[in-house]
Image (cartoon, rainbow, N blue to C red):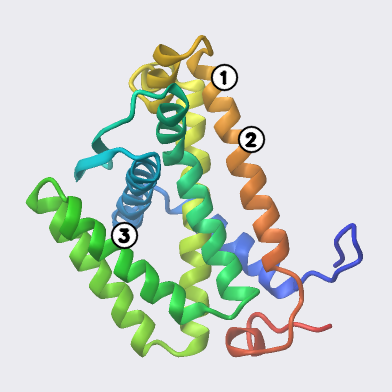
Amino acid sequence: MQTSSGAKLDFGRVALLLVLLGVGWFFWDSPALWPLKLLVVMMHESGHALATLLAGGAVDRITLAANESGACLSRLPASMLAQVAVYSAGYVGSALAGAFLLLATFRFRLRRLMLFASCACLAAMGVLYAGDGFTLAFCLGTALVLGLAAKYLPDGGVDMLNLFLAAFTALYVVVDLRSDLWNGAARSVSDAALLADLTPVPSWAWAALWSFLSLTLLGLFARWSLRAARPEGLGSSLLSSRR
């Protein structure tokens, strides 16, 4: 399988990525996937928080709820551009998190570093900004699981875990954007509604823009990540690759 530029794609990785997307879709309502959904919600809120800090604002607290909702309460600069960036950073930030996880694992072989970095970031967000006990417990508990996985899983297991996290993050972003784009009730209380109040652009247009940007980023990073490389770790078994 080749890209338009002639670079070969690793068929094993492509097939496995599609399988994991299918597993996530088929078992979407399974309670077993609830922690992963909440993790993606935390990625979304962390995107808002990081954008706030980069824009010169201050983050007061982040809260998660068992019904998969979340909130990032912060003090934003008066600049409309800064506010647009912060409100947009949730969806786009989640997409970037999944995309970078995929790229760092399979193009740069930073599998364990990515899990350790995810562990550290999640723990830091929890300690610094968790607004209640549930959010703090989830962040620290999930960070512990990711840290243990990074330390004790074999290379192939880390590759598989990272690929599944990236695939599930991408799937959740798509489902979440579809809800905001087509469900008027959900869109009326989403980040898209905040931007519609701030700008003359309607909420559905913001959701459409986020969909385009998020899917484009995920597609580009997936294409870079799934090019064939020399066998290593998981690449020597399920994800065997050839030049």
Q: What's the amino acid at mark 2?
A: Phe
* Pointer 3 local density, CA inside 10 Å: few below 14, some 14–19, many at least 20: few
Q: Which mark is residue 221?
A: none
| CA–CA distance in space, label 3 to label 2 | 30 Å
Q: Which residue does the image show at 34% across and 45% down from the upper left?
A: 53
Return the residue at label 1: 205
Return the residue at label 2: 212
| CA–CA distance in space, label 3 to label 1 | 34 Å
Q: What's the amino acid at mark 1?
A: Ala
Q: Which residue does the image show at 24% across and 35% down from the upper left?
A: 74
* Pointer 2 local density, CA inside 10 Å: few below 14, some 14–19, many at least 20: some
**Label located before the other in sequence (3 or 1):** 3
Q: Which residue does the image show at 37% across and 23% down from the upper left?
A: 186
Disc 2 + disc 1, Cβ < 8 Å = no
Q: Position of residue 48 (x, y in %)?
A: 36, 41
**Label located before the other in sequence (2 or 1):** 1
**Label located before the other in sequence (3 or 2):** 3
Q: What's the amino acid at mark 3?
A: Ala
Q: Secondary structure at mark 2?
A: helix
Return the residue at label 3: 32
